[in-house]
């Protein structure tokens, strides 16, 4: 029987019920006077829907997300992007000054930021940089996790900013090894672009796995701030108790529900397919440029590119009105820029700028 993930929750939170908001109790009525809301709308609220607090966990949104991700609604908590999910996991599982989080740099910086803001120690097992891109040393992760009191292992797949995809069988082996010791968190913010099975498929066999998803990337709703954590239903209940009372604004809930309708999802899937085609085209064109040392293989919607002179490339791109992500301050990514895959025309502009570097224009 898989180990109970509740054993990983902070012991001082045993029995913690969190804040009980006016929307927590499922009550019926036609005159609502329990939340100190105004009884008439603001003049700018034409439809009169914003004077009421939103449902903390809207059932229609959770159901739509669960269908999209292949889990049950009880296994999913929705919140303000993946960032809130990361913070909730650290808060619920790690005692300040008493537990440890493991990260695999270069990776998404919010794992370490949330841990450090919470007073939680961070240990690192760096990714290996090879001819075929970045790879993860799962044996080293298991050893460090078992000897350093690690409660949370954050794995980013596809990686950000590296673009590498982690093998699902290796993730499963790690979860099995760390059962009862640590929660293995797989961040799949870019999962739609990977064309690979999700780690959600591991939950039925390994209760110490959690998966992060978002509508910010493939669904083009970064401004709506809709993210999810998918995990064992009992752990989801604990995370909800640690969450702020009303995490999602009503307009964001509404737009997310519309984006998860079948016709909108079909359009999203078509957009993802276009990004993948453009990713391969842009990658091939950049790899042929003599000013570029390496274009890393990517299963995401961006390319990590190492230049001979990243400063010159950055300045030339900015002068052409093209903004990319400078990664040079990240250890191990000297002379590297991260370039998001844009439209066909936008990618052509990037290629033209890089070609102009070679000509010294």
Image (tube, helix red, strand yellow):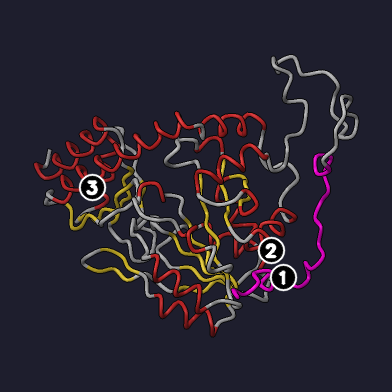
- The residue at the far front in this view is 1
Q: Which residues are magenta?
A: 1-25
| Quarter placement of the N terminus | bottom right
| Dot 2 or dot 3, earlier in sequence | 2
Give yes or no for contact between labels 1 and 2 (Cβ–Cβ under 8 Å).
yes
Q: Nearer the viewer, mark 2 or mark 3?
A: 2
Q: Nearer the viewer, residue 302 or 62?
A: 62
Which mark, by number, is residue 92? 2
Q: Quadrant of residue 224?
A: top right
Q: Quadrant of residue 358?
A: top left
* Residue located beneath label 1 in the image: 10
- Looking at the image, which residue is at 80% across and 44% down? 24
Seen in the picture, residue 36 relative to 128 is either above or below; the reply is above
Cα distance in 3D space between marks 1 and 2: 6 Å
Which mark, by number, is residue 312? 3
Q: Position of residue 290 (x, y in %)?
A: 11, 51
């Amino acid at each position: 029987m898989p180990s109970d993930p509740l054993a990983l929750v902070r012991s001082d939170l045993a029995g913690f019920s969190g804040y009980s908001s006016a929307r927590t109790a499922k009550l019926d009525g036609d005159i609502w006077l329990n939340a100190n809301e105004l009884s008439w709308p603001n003049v700018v609220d034409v439809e009169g829907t914003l004077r009421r607090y939103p449902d903390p966990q809207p059932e229609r949104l959770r159901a739509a997300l669960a269908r999209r991700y292949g889990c049950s609604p009880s296994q999913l908590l929705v919140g303000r992007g993946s960032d809130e999910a990361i913070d909730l996991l650290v808060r619920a599982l790690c005692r300040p000054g008493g537990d440890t989080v493991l990260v695999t740099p270069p990776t998404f910086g919010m794992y370490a930021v949330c841990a450090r803001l919470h007073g939680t120690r961070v240990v690192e097992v760096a990714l290996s940089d090879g001819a075929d891109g970045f790879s993860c040393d799962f044996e080293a992760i298991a050893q460090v996790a078992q000897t350093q009191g690690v409660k949370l292992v954050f794995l980013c797949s596809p990686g950000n900013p590296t673009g590498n995809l982690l093998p699902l069988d290796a993730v499963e082996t790690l979860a099995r090894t760390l059962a009862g010791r640590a929660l293995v968190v797989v961040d799949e913010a870019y999962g739609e672009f990977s064309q690979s099975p999700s780690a959600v498929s591991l939950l039925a066999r390994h209760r110490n796995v959690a998966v992060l998803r978002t509508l910010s990337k493939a669904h083009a709703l970064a401004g709506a701030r809709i993210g999810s954590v998918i995990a064992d239903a009992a752990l989801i209940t604990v995370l909800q108790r640690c969450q702020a009372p009303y995490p999602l604004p009503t307009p964001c809930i509404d737009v997310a529900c519309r984006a998860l309708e079948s016709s909108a999802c079909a359009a999203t899937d078509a957009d993802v397919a276009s990004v993948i085609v453009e990713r391969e085209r842009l990658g091939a064109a950049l790899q042929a440029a003599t000013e570029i040392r390496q274009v890393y293989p990517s299963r995401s919607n961006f390319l990590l590119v190492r230049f001979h002179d990243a400063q010159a490339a950055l300045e030339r791109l900015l002068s052409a009105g093209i903004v990319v992500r400078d990664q040079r301050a990240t250890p191990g990514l000297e002379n590297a820029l991260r370039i998001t895959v844009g439209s066909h025309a936008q990618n052509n502009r990037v290629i033209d700028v890089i070609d102009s570097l070679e000509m010294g224009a």
